[in-house]
Image (cartoon, rainbow, N blue to C red):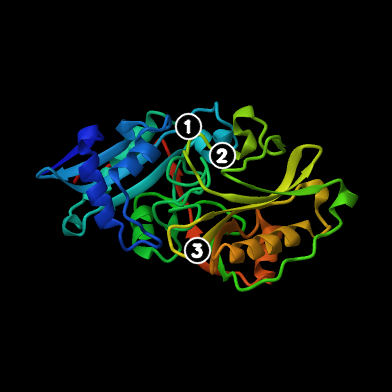
Amino acid sequence: MISFVSYAPSLLSRLVSFWNTVFQERRHFSPITLEAYQKRIVAQPTFDPQGLVLALAGGAVAGLVHAIKPVPPDLFIYRARRCRDNGSIAALAVAPKWRGKGIGSALLARAEEYLAKHLKPGGLTYVGDYDLPLYHTLEGPRQPFWGDTETMGVEENDSEFIRFLTRRGYTPAPREGQEVTMAASVGQPREPVSPPLGTFGLEEVTLSDTKPWPGRVAWFPDKELQEYSYPLSGDAPYRVIALARDGTIMSHIQWYPMRQPGYAALWDLLVAESDRGHGLGRYLLDKGLWMMARQGYHTVELHTHTQKNALAYRIYLRRGFQVVVRWVTLQKEGSKPSWISA
């Protein structure tokens, strides 16, 4: 007999045990702890226990789905994201012994019913979207529980799950280009020669979580996000090489250590639009790779978009990065739950 219940604190240990069993074959999976899930998911202001539904069989978790309603608009990190006005399915899984019994369909339908209560007309439900709160990296530079450096996502070759969703009304989200994971060997690069930064009124600074920037960051308009602070993700180790003008960070490369020994996650490479065309992006990447090698990393991985980040994508290709995973996003009108009885 299967029962469906919303999350309660008494279920946390069973949820984590299920998670560590059912997702262990996923790329870059690492077992989670009760403390990590509590801190990273449950304790966050975006979390709503009604959206996290568990299927129970004799007290054990047989499946789960986590639906996340549109997020509060008061934080800059969410304001320009699709999660601001749409819903997301963060995770959906059924234990192998319980598959083929309609449990996955029943969980998905309950998630859709939950989201339908919170979506405005025209709102969508996304599965595999990059703009996912809690589990991805919108809140700060930390490796997702599995997937790549920025997303758990839906891999393009996950045909079984994609068929499951398409049979229930989901369609590929319109796109130009694609979200991809890229990786490269750090190698033994030489320290690159710095361009004439003074000519552009720039100075180079090296920063970290223990040595934050005391001034402004150009693309962070909110005061609470200055100094590369990430209050929602807690202590997040990172390193930065930045170019500053008049006390404001204009361009940077930022990376963090992955759980896999010897792996660094290149989290962001950004050059101010007004400073492009002078080789600053290539310099920052080369300087970052040189520093990663000095820190003992042998492999660097990143997540990017082949069109939205076309300039960076071309730089990565020229520096030997190769696409190792392609990601897809599926969507459905959020007001149309597809109920299929368990």
Q: Are marks 2 and 1 in contact (CB under 8 Å)?
A: yes
Amino acid under label 1?
Val
Q: Nearer the viewer, residue 206 or 325?
A: 206
Residue 301: x, y in percent? Answer: 54, 63
Nearer to us of marks 2 and 3 is 3
Contact, mark 2 vs mark 3 (Cβ under 8 Å) = no
In the image, what residue type sits under mark 2? Arg
Tag 3: amino acid: Tyr
The answer for how far apart the CA atoms under marks 2 and 3 are is 28 Å
Q: Please state if 247 lies on the left or on the right of 21 as rendered.
A: right
Q: Earlier in the sequence, mark 2 or mark 3?
A: 2
Q: Secondary structure at mark 2?
A: loop
Residue drawn at x 70%, y 71% is 190
Give percent across and percent down for residue 206: 68, 50
Q: Mark 3 highlights which residue? A: 263
* Label 3: element kind: strand
Q: Crowding at label 3, few (<14), some or many (≥20) Cα neighbours within 10 Å?
A: many
- Residue 81 image label: 2
> In this view of the protein, can residue 337 be seen by the observer?
no
> Residue tagged by mark 1?
71
Who comes first in sequence, dot 3 or dot 1? 1
Estimate how packed mark 2 is, as few (under 14), some (14 to 19) or many (20 or more) residues with alpha carbons within 10 Å.
Answer: some
